[in-house]
Amino acid sequence: MYPERHAIAARFGLKDPINAGTENVVERVFAETDGRGADAVILAVGGNALIKTAMDAVRPGGKVMLFAQTQHGEASFDPGAVCMDEKTLLGSYSSSFPILDEVTELVFGGYSDGFDLTQLISHRFPLEQAVEAIEIASHPKADSMKIMIEPVLGASGRT
């Protein structure tokens, strides 16, 4: 939805972003995949409105993962897509324990190989300003990516 975020993602290799605010996501996915649909979709935003879009964009036999879906509620999607099209809808809140070491190395060691995930941190707050940090994180905007609360500001080696 935010071109500013696409620019940051481009530094990590994103070449052709889909702007969900101005483009039909399902049509674009099918156009990019020669009419096949996505093999997998990771929906990493809260709320239920995009579950149907994700299910519509994935190919028969494809998978949709709801990552960190932390809101209870009702969602609308075609149940025939699960049975007849054999689309898989699954959820995850965190990474699995067996890959924790690999993920830790990617996050904390990747920057030395040019994969600096600290570029995703848009705001840093001391512990005393945790309420303000949570408020910004709770209402995402174009200039807010990842919000970090540090017990001692700058203790992570960055300011």
Image (spheres, rainbow, N blue to C red):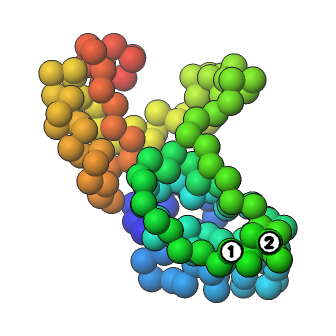
Quarter of the rendering occupied by the N terminus: bottom left
Between 139 and 66, the one lying in front of the other is 66
Q: Residues within 10 Å of mark 2 (few under 14, many from 20)?
A: few
Q: How far across and down, in percent of the image, does residue 97 sit?
A: 69, 23
Residue 38's place in the image compared with 27, above or below, is above
> Which kind of residue does numbered mark 2 sit on?
Cys
Task: Kindly identify which residue carries mark 1.
Answer: 79
Answer whether residue 123 is visible to the viewer in this image. Answer: yes
Which residue shows up at 53% across the image and 74% down it?
A: 76
Task: Kindly identify which residue carries mark 2.
Answer: 83
Between 128 and 91, the one lying in front of the other is 91
Q: Quadrant of residue 150?
A: top left
Quarter of the rendering occupied by the C terminus: top left
For marks 1 and 2, give the CA distance.
7 Å
> Which kind of residue does numbered mark 1 sit on?
Pro
Residue 22's place in the image compared with 158, above or below, is below
Between 92 and 154, the one lying in front of the other is 92
Which residue shows up at 39% across the image and 17% down it?
A: 156
